[in-house]
Image (cartoon, rainbow, N blue to C red):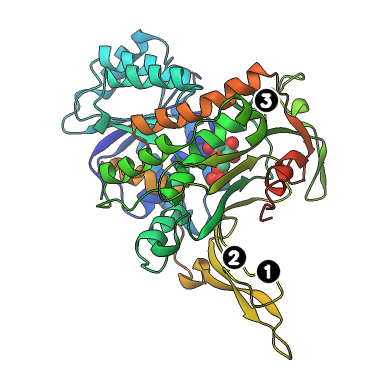
Amino acid sequence: MSIPCDILVFGGTGDLALRKLLPALYQLYRQNRLHNAVRIIALARQPLSRRDYLKRVERHGRAQIAPADFDDELWRRFCARLDYFAMDAAQGADFVRLARYLGEPGGLTRIFYLATAPSLFASIAGHLRLAGLADPEARIVLEKPIGHSLASAQAINHAIGAVFEESQVFRIDHYLGKETVQNLMALRFANALLEPVWRNAQVDHVQISVCETLGVENRGAYYDRAGATRDMLQNHLLQLLCLVAMEPPAQFEAEAVRDEKVKILRALRPLGDQDVQDQTVRGQYSAGRIGGQEVPAYYFEKDVDHDSDTETFVAVQAHIENWRWAGVPFYLRTGKRMARRSSQIVIQFKPVPHALFASEQVNQLLIRLQPEERISLRMMTKRPGKGMHLAPVDLDLNLAQAFGHTRRWDAYERLLLDILEGDSTLFMRRDEVEAAWAWIDPILKGWEAHFQAPRPYPAGSNGPEQANSLLANQGRQWHD
Ligand code: BG6
């Protein structure tokens, strides 16, 4: 059971709060993980009554929560802990009102969850301090993206650091809360078998792909300013890369794990001007078909500029300059409106040193995060019958099958519980966020300097052709 606390959600009427955070808090409540004294207060500008807000929460809750988990009586009791407080996060006077509404902490820890645009983070932290709400027990949770460049991320981190100690700050990357992503650490650090082959002598290259069929939905205004690089590559994909490439930490504990991750980010070879031309591809979807349905081009999406040159796809070849990974390319790719939803990591091993048989002989470890959780190792075997004809067969770890009916936790459930328990292992530390931006900044600047417009790709495809050439030029191909 968690500590007694007030959870204050800034951006309480936003998509994230309604679709993810409140359903996740309900799930924790349902599993008896929330302390009896927990209060949840949603904060936003709209002048809604509590009743109207609860109706909205219920509408989203019913859409998000599996019917078997939605219990009317439990929901009613959960809602009794939930309140709505209308305020403008840009107005200092509203924080004074908020402090009055909350009253004395009286042993309750205050958790401020900033599900807002990052441009508000610094001012909210400042107002919390002035209103006397940022006591040493408080925790602050920041949603990605933290800033839109290295300089803006540093400015946010500096402003937050002026009010809160680093141990009070939880920077969320929800990919770290995903079961399979944590499984990656179990796979690597609990199986002695893999360690000797997890290095450049045996690994040919690594692919990390997060492909979505979704477009920008209702988030056009945000997305058009962000693009795939800031929205996905700077955080989710680089975090996955860290988990694949990091050295084993001495303990499974926040500082030890994050120390190892930051070393990887700092070892990424910076991309110079020419590398940005040669080793990155940016794309934008044009009209196409997804699941038989026609979908419009990106620049016709709601709230998107008709002349937009924001990328909805990015592919990059990265190199980690350390002993373990020298010479091994890491190909990263993410895009919206792709042919199918699939997030996966592929570790492609080198071929056998001397080929005895005619066909290609390579092993490949596939770690599938979405849509299904699966880990499989491709082995070469002999086809039955005469002659030594080989075929690849997968050694499969089907997690859904292995753990049967065990309910899979949503990433936000896991991460919210960690925040309540004060465990920051799965959250990004300040230096990690900045090291990631330090590698991303030259890519964004390189595109800008060369007016590199995104390459069009039809919705429902695997991205622009240039992304295929990125690998094909080196005799490789994406695992689709
Ligand atoms: C979010 C991005 O962080 O991750 C979205 O802002 C993206 O654009 C989403 O769709 C993908 O998350 P998931 O868990 O559906 O893979």
The residue carrying mark 2 is 351
Of residues 73 and 400, which is closer to you in this image? 400
Looking at the image, which residue is at 38% across and 14% down?
123
Residue 55 appears in the picture as rendered = no
* Callout 1 crowding tier (Cα within 10 Å): few <14, some 14–19, many ≥20: few
The reply to whether discs 1 and 2 touch (Cβ–Cβ < 8 Å) is yes
The mark that comes first in sequence, 1 or 2, is 2
Looking at the image, which residue is at 40% across and 44% down?
25
Mark 2 vs mark 3, foreground winner is 2
Toward which corner of the image does residue 136 lie, by quadrant?
Answer: top left
The residue carrying mark 1 is 360
Residue 129 appears in the picture as rendered = yes
The reply to whether discs 2 and 3 touch (Cβ–Cβ < 8 Å) is no
Label 1 – label 2 distance at C-alpha: 8 Å
Provide the secondary structure element on which disc 1 rests: loop
The residue type indicated by label 2 comes to: Pro
In this rendering, would 89 be left or right of 393?
left
The residue carrying mark 3 is 310
User: Measured along the vertical axis of the image, is residue 285 above or below residue 423?
Assistant: above
User: Measured along the vertical axis of the image, is residue 375 above or below residue 37?
Assistant: below
Label 2 – label 3 distance at C-alpha: 39 Å
Residue 222 point in image, percent of width and height: 59, 24
Looking at the image, which residue is at 52% across and 47% down?
327
Label 3 – label 1 distance at C-alpha: 40 Å
How many numbered markers are drawn? 3
